[in-house]
Amino acid sequence: MNSLFLIVLWPALSALAILLCKGAKQVRTASLVASAIQLGLTLYIAFEYYTLRRAGDHSPFMMQSNLNWFPQFGISLHMGIDGISLAMLLLTSVVVLCGVLVSWNISYLTKEFYFLLILLSMGAYGFFISLDLFTLFFFLELAVIPKFMLIGIWGSGRKEYAAMKLALMLMGGSALILIGLLGVYFNSHTSGGLPTFDLLKLSVVHIPRNAQHILFPFLFLGFGVFTAIFPFHTWAPDGHSSAPTAASMFLAGISMKLGGYGCIRVACLLMPEAAQYYGPAIIVLACIAILYGAFATMMQKDLKYINAYSSVSHCGFVLLGIAMFTQTALIGAVMQMVSHGLMTALFFAVIGMLYERTHTRMTADMSGLLKIMPFLGTVFIIAGLCSLGLPGLSGFVSEMTIFMGSWQRPDAFHRIATILACASIVVTAVYILRAAGKVLMGPISNEHFRSLKDAAWNEKLASVILILSIVLIGVAPFLLSGLIRPGAFEIMKTIANATVLN
Amino acid sequence: MGTDFFILMKSELSLAIILFVLIFIKVFREDMSNASLFRLVNILLLLNLIVGFLCNSKGELFGGMFRTDPVIGFEKSILNLGILLISLQSLEWSKLQKHFAEFYMLLLSTLLGMFFMMSSGNFLMFYLGLELSTIPLAALSSFDFNKMKSSEAGMKLILSSAFSSAILLFGLSILYGCTGTLEFNALAPLISSVDHLQLLAFILIFSGFAFKLSTVPFHFWTADVYEGSPVAVTAYLSVVSKASVIFILLTVLYTVFRNLGAAWYDLLAILAVISMTFGNLFALRQDNIKRLLAFSSITQAAYLLVGITEGSILGWSSVIYFILIYLCSNFALFGVVSFVSARYNKEMIADYKGFYATNPFLSWVMVLALFSLAGIPPTAGFFGKLFLLTSAATKGNTLLIIFASLNMVASLYYYLRVVKAIFIDKNENPIEKTPLPLSLYLSLGVCIAGVLMLGIFPGVFQYIYKLF
């Protein structure tokens, strides 16, 4: 038992506390306080992490604690963090806090709404600190059903369809993961002894090559479904656009990161040889996602669909960075996860705020909003600029890192992939600038819009927190990349060893 | 004999005592109201459950005909718990009944039959127990006298049971012809996979089991019987009756037919895959919640078969653990369905639209139970299912794991349909808000506590594992 356990225990406790609250106001306050404390906890963990690192602790995973859970199956509550998980934890707690803030006006079944939000965040927290595949899978699945409920109950548009599609596709993804995990489990006792789910024990077991070749696609595609890998991305646009604002933020900001994290931590770390073998295939899929996502976004008229498709494109960068297998690209991929998480959360938040006021999300129906709502307009522009990669914001540094890392692979295939991915940024600029121009600039088309109010305190607070984080990463990227580097180094070491074996 | 007799047969004896009490009540106190009968029987069943946990020891009686050990004792306690939960949930339904005492008598005599079956050390004893458990069940299925469907269910159940018993007996007679004995311990070393006649006998016997478990292709009776029977009986059929067959199947496979391991492994794996796929495909299109649960129970039984393939203590304890969880989740669901069905005569999924607005407590119970059936964390069903699959994974059969995992997704669809009806769909006139009787609260509380606690806290699984 150490402070790391609190990271998952606290959401559980606060979810229970929310159930005991009476009235919407209490529920809101409780969730806000709970998620603020959670952010504080994560910051404390980060502080502790830095102190340990500074003191010369160079073990790959810090603050480990290991409790027996079901020893007969080799299952333990093994928790620990490295820089990558810490970055994800920080991202999650920021997005959760902002998600709670922007859902202030939910009046239908408020208690259930916040309960599910906190439950969802608990899944993410647990996932990022688990060092046991069973526990990891437990938390991954824990995060799926709240999404179904959030979209189904509080969503808009074709919400039943979107909720069902999302739940089934994500569960399909986790079924693939399960197959991969059980395969790993079966192969874990080739070295003698009991089979185990423990990630650290597994990482020293060498899984036979032909087994890797069978299992890797299951694991990678399974996690890939969560990151909306092409061709399993179709849940993302429908899900994002039908979800209530906070759920969209969670989906794009946290949930899609579960997949990327799993690809790195589980698939690539445990099966480095197969990862290299399938690398080119992943790059092809990632490039398709990047380009297809970008071009599909250009055709969208609905703001939420614009952001959803651009998320597919941006998450393609994550997969591209992973599959390049250079340390720089991997660091870039993790930075892109954090940056994309913050940026889409901000974007979905501001779209939600606009929608709440104008009751439309169609770009064609809006114009000149910047004059009426200067604050929201500015936030919209900042989110857009981050998305298209303006220097000084987080999007630029992370995409740049991925490209630099990719360029280190000198052969024609990787070069072409890198160039194609770079080219998509132009398309991004087109759709972002077009959307921003249409919605914010120009004459005010609808007279009703004149009476709209600018952001309230909660919306301002959420936007400011997210913008500050984005700018911080953009201005001082070394904070983030320094955090990620040791973890990425470990993973690259495993992959490099596998190359030697090959 | 002496004290041994009383200790080893305590579960059977305590059931028999309750049965006698019921008969005396029927004869001498016919005017006793259903409500007071209900109270009395539930207290007796609670005592019976407690007795089941006391001094479980290992031993044999009647020259090896009857045997028991701590594992069997625990299995019987699970069934005792099941019967108590069913009884607690049947208050609403009992108000419609004229012959409530008979309902209990039949219920308890089938349970007695199951206990004898589970404790059998000889195929003759096994068959005796099986029949004692089946015939009252048919009577129970047709207990709703004023419903045509109920009579139909009883008829279908008795006919298909007779058929399956005939197959089973045929297998047993061949086995006896080959080996000259029906005793479990004596049979085990005599069986070899070289003898094709023995293999045939095994397949026939196994078919008899498969009928009771409603494994595809022996499932045709299931949906109609489940739909027609009173809900309490459906719950009983889907959990308790199946569980008892699984328990004895484990003994038979792991001890008597252990030499045929390779043969039954393939058989189980194939039947499991076929059953879960067909069960899911049929369940996708059901609109009646009882029929839905009938097909879902076929799928769940298939997962049990997956776990059984492991062939050692790990698989055995996972199966017992899963059954305990399945009992909690299914009874939570049936508890609500039974109450709504008895009070409002509504059994369709569409009737549950907008249920959350009027009955939040019952809705949460249903949803948690559904998630547990679908195997979604943090409910216990997740752990139960994963343990079955993990046990099976130690054999390294990738295809079996692939089919089982993908089927979990397919089954999620129909469970989510019910969740969607309860939480998302709007309804002009939903099921009204109703005060619940205390007994229903109690039984649902026990079930939900099981659904939430059995998984996250590892104690129960460790307890089962250490019984061996």
Image: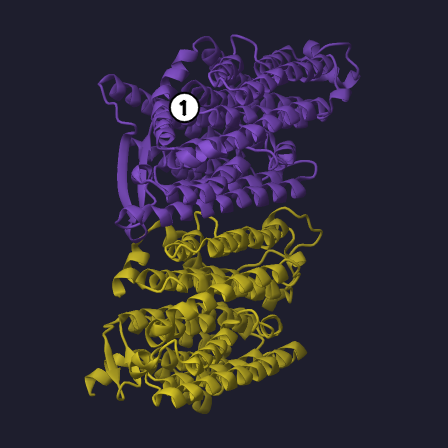
The quadrant where residue A15 appears? top left
Give whichever of A174, B374 is nearer the camera. A174
Asked whether residue A14 appears in the rendered view, the answer is: no
State the scheme by which the image is colored. Answer: by chain
Drawn colour of chain A? Answer: purple
Residue at the location (57% across, 60% down)? Answer: B277
Residue at the location (65% across, 53% down)? Answer: B353
* Left or right: where B199 falls relative to A350: left
Residue B85 position in % (x across, y down) = 44, 67
Asked whether residue B221 appears in the rendered view, the answer is: yes
- The correct choice, above or below, for B63 with respect to A26 in the image is below
Residue B304 position in % (x across, y down) = 44, 63
- The correct choice, above or below, for A361 with respect to A395 in the image is below
Neighbour tally class for label 1: few under 14, some 14-19, many 20 plus, Cα within 10 Å: many
* Left or right: where A384 falls relative to A404: right
- The correct choice, above or below, for A271 with respect to B228 in the image is above
The quadrant where residue A349 appears? top right
Tag 1 subunit? A
Residue at the location (57% across, 29% down)? Answer: A284
Give whichever of B319, A164 is nearer the camera. B319
Q: Which chain is assigned yellow?
A: B
Residue B259 position in % (x across, y down) = 34, 73
Q: Amino acid at mark 1?
A: Ala
Q: Which residue is mark 1?
A: A87
